[in-house]
Amino acid sequence: MDNQERVILHVDMDAFFAAIEQRDNPDLIGNPVVIGADPKAGQGRGVVSTCSYEARKYGIHSAMPISTAYRHCPEAVFLPVNMRLYTEVSGELDEIFREFTPLTEKISIDEAFLDIGGSWHLFGSTKKTAVELKKRVKERVGLTASIGIAPNKFVAKIASDFGKPDGLVMVDKEDILDFLTPLDISKMWGAGKKTTAMLRKMNINTIGDIASRSKKELHDIFGKQGRKFWNLANGIDNREVVEEHDIKSVSNEITFSEDTDDIRIIENRFLRLSEKVSRRLNTKELKGNNISIKLRTKNFKTYTRAVTLDNPVSDADTIFKWVKKLVEKTSWKKSKVRLIGVRVSGFGREQEQMDLFANDESIKKESVNEALHQIRNKYGDSIIYRSGRILKKKDI
Ligand code: TTP
Ligand code: MG
């Protein structure tokens, strides 16, 4: 396939850690919020992990010493890193991404590449796919994502950054060079501070400047990396989206079109989700011994409950039986519910692989028996079996 025909989508969440904190504490919305080390009134050591866009107006940014950030904006709200929470949200994003294509490559806690070349038509167009992805993320996780769409990874990644926050930027194949040419070389993938400084000394300040030099010149100075720069600057990037094969869980969730506290509706939806999860487990020939539910209220308070069973399961009845028990254990009732989810995990890889081998063996045995049966029918008993090979009498 011509790589230029690929449709690569790059998603990157906006001010990820800070946005989660703002989501969970609406008082923080619209205010400068800095996530990172304790500023200790300007005496703190350590750095800024990230900050809200409001804090960025004061010049605060990731990796800045926290004491400097404090000097820039002492009235900002400084919060510690709650990695457990952010990782959980990141996992929820993965699930949403995989609803768009199995070709999903997570490259950091808040960003991923999706190859939607084979799936965008399901959503009408590439743009509609991106709009739908942003919508699902907003509805289900309560955060904004920025998306870039392009025929390759390099351009898609730059494009997602271009429209931030809450952006959606598409670059068609024929516009790649126009898009890249004016960009500052700091956007060049793989060019750190030293390389950037060297490039500037060579009077190379934009990606277009790289493109206009010869590949040989760049190779002579930067080696293999130089050739990469030249290719990227000329819009050539054949890197594939590498999907993760190791399935850790199977889950499904829905957002109610209207928030509800009607337990009959909620249970009915949990039943349907259990059935869906069961179907997906069966198609993937998986069984898990960990069942969990998620229940998210109107104001994004999230309840999760889980149970670990003695034996792995995949059938809808058993899953739903446990889901129901878990729902009963959840004290969500004070608020209306916006989203629910069911997940089965705990596949125990070794067990699973042994089972697979066992299955393979039994399938092999069956087909060997079937073959022998047919051969016997054809040649009668006058055939001899030797070291796994089937020989006719005349071969001996
Ligand atoms: P980024 O995507 O680089 O930053 P961001 O999501 O906060 O803001 P935006 O994408 O809108 O510019 O990184 C994702 C998260 O990774 C970020 O929220 C916090 C963490 N992070 C660090 O802890 N240290 C860092 O130096 C960087 C760059 C990010
Ligand atoms: Mg981000």
Image (cartoon, rainbow, N blue to C red):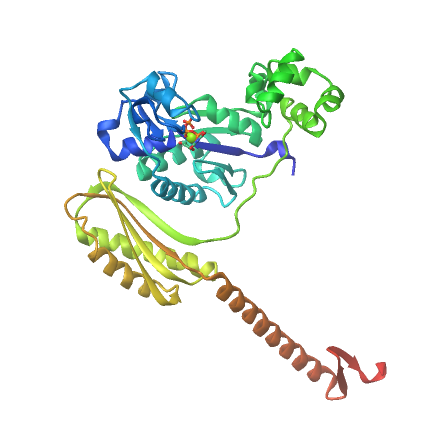
Q: Which quadrant would residue 2 be assigned to in this image? A: top right
Quadrant where the C terminus is found in the figure: bottom right
Q: Is residue 80 left or right of residue 47?
A: left
> Who's the residue at 42% across and 63% down the image?
287
Task: Give the camera-side residue of 200 and 20.
Answer: 200
* Residue at 54% in and 70% down: 359
Q: Nearer the viewer, residue 357 or 62?
A: 62
Residue 25 location (% of width, % of height) = 24, 33
Q: Position of residue 393 (x, y in %)?
A: 82, 85
**Taking 81 as reference, is 326 left or right?**
left
Q: Quadrant of the N terminus?
A: top right
Q: How many marks?
A: 0
Query: If the picture is divided into quarters, which one holds ligand 2?
Result: top left
Q: Nearer the viewer, residue 96 or 203?
A: 203
- Measuring 16% from the left and 43% from the top, which residue is drawn there? 335
- Residue occupying image coordinates x 53% and y 51%: 245
In this view, 192 is above or below 328? above
Tell whether 164 sits left or right of 329. Answer: right
Q: Is residue 50 left or right of residue 172?
A: left
